[in-house]
Amino acid sequence: MEKPKIEISGLNKKFGDLAVLKGISLSVEAGSVVAIIGPSGSGKSTLLRCINLLVTPDGGQIRVGEDAFTFGPGTKLPGTRDLARFRSNTGMVFQHFNLFPHMSVLGNVMEAPVTVRKKSKAEARELALALLAKVGLSDKADEFPARLSGGQKQRVAIARALAMQPDVMLFDEATSALDPELVGEVLGVMKKLATEGMTMVIVTHEIAFAREVADRVIFMRDGIVAEEGPAHQVIDAPRETATQAFLSHFHRGGHHQTAETAP
Amino acid sequence: MYQWDFAFLWSYRWLFLKGLGVTVAFTVGIVLLGLVIGQLAALAKLSKWAPLRILSHTYIELFRCTPVLVQLVWFYYALPVLSGIEISAVSAAMLALSLYGGSFYAEIIRGGIVSIDPGQTEAGAALGMTPFQTMRRIILPQAFKRMVPPLMNQSIIQFKNTSLVSVLAVPDLLYQGQVAAHDSYRPLEVYTAIAVAYFVILYPLTILVRKGEEALARND
């Protein structure tokens, strides 16, 4: 059997006195989709940010593809060049899009291939236009981010991450900042990526989407993996009381209930 | 009652023009040099490396918290004694005013950089850009837009500060004015004329800054 694309073991992270990750282990098979769910403050975003080392763990091991890092007392942190090269192989999509407001949509998607991969402008442009077509935004190439809707911004952000032709895509609550009617278009693009065989780790509150698209679901609580398993099993028949309690806040359809309608 | 008479000033026009030329050239010099110093000091103050941060902080506060007139005199009289290197009045004045301006520019530039959403830095890093690439391609172009009005304001102050170089006998507009005042025994007219000259140059620039600030407010 092929070795997993992502392997994490014994991952620890503290912010000051607060232990956010307590010995997390996790593996993601190539081409599979893993969804991380759990309440706010459970450490799921921090875990995701550790995978591309936007957050430096205090201890543990991380391997993505051929790149492996060990963290802990006495280990040297990777230098800025190593970090940059490592991150160029993983794409990340942020909750608040983080598009570059001073560049056009096309400029956003072309930026990293030109600056990091040293591709020619023409080559990067061709790639960017193909990716914008893929996320359904060919007609917005010359617009600036400020003129786009949230859903359009997030699709540009996905195209921008894909432009580095990453092996792995990380989604950090990619739909949480969107108006409800715009969520679908972003989830649609993510689903398409999943069916194309992209290895994906998704932090999400879209339980129905996780159930439909993810191969495995991880439920995190207080910095540990409280439950893990095939998506249908964790969501439809959770074993742990904590998972059951968390999922009871969602309708069967998977939408988050508001305070007024909660039982 | 004092009898105002501005007509005689005409005969000093070439002297004033020469002085104005020195003032403008000096301003251009200290603004450019100050911006380079300020940019370096701002980046040093944002450095991960503590000694660089401390060095930059010390420089900035030393120059922001002492009078520029004292700095000018110190660079001309005290520095040669301490270092053993003779410097001309022009060099001393250039150095002191550039360092003085640089300390204020540094804070403006640093403020502009830290005002940019940290998500921008994260996005650059996540795409595999080095911190230097992120700074150059993502952060500075956005920060620069926000810095322009305060940098212009500081440069206007720098323009006026050049009048202090007259104490080192650098022949700027104010120095030539003093010459004309002694020569004509009419200091009231001469200094009035010099004030008008500064105002005529700087007032349009302040309008430009205000327009820039308004444009910025619309865009954000």
Image (cartoon, rainbow, N blue to C red):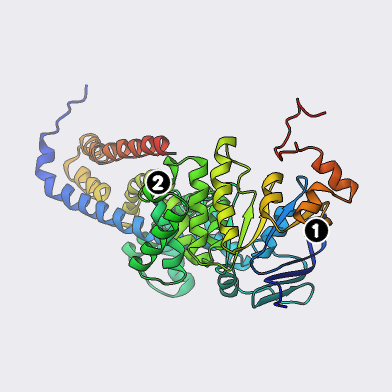
Placement of A179 over or under B171, stated as above or below: above
Q: Are marks 2 and 1 in contact (CB under 8 Å)?
A: no
Camera-side residue: A117 or B15? Answer: A117
Q: CA distance from mark 2 to mark 1?
A: 42 Å
Camera-side residue: B105 or A169? Answer: A169
Camera-side residue: B45 or A49? Answer: A49
Camera-side residue: A249 or A191? Answer: A191
Give the x, y percent position of residue A203.
Answer: 68, 52
Please name the amino acid that badge 2 sits on.
Answer: Phe
Q: Which residue is mark 1?
A: A229
Q: Is residue B183 left or right of residue B160?
A: left
Residue at image position (36%, 62%) is A125
What element does badge 1 sit on?
Answer: strand
Please name the amino acid that badge 1 sits on.
Answer: Gly
Give the x, y percent position of residue A211.
Answer: 71, 50
Q: Which mark is residue A144?
A: 2
Residue at image position (13%, 39%) is B9
Q: Which mark is residue B188?
A: none
Q: Is residue A60 left or right of residue A141?
A: right
Placement of A149 over or under A133, stated as above or below: above
The subunit letter for the residue under badge 1 reads A
Q: Residues within 10 Å of mark 1 (few under 14, many from 20)?
A: some
Query: Quadrant location of the C terminus of chain A?
Result: top right
Placement of A150 over or under B141, stated as above or below: above
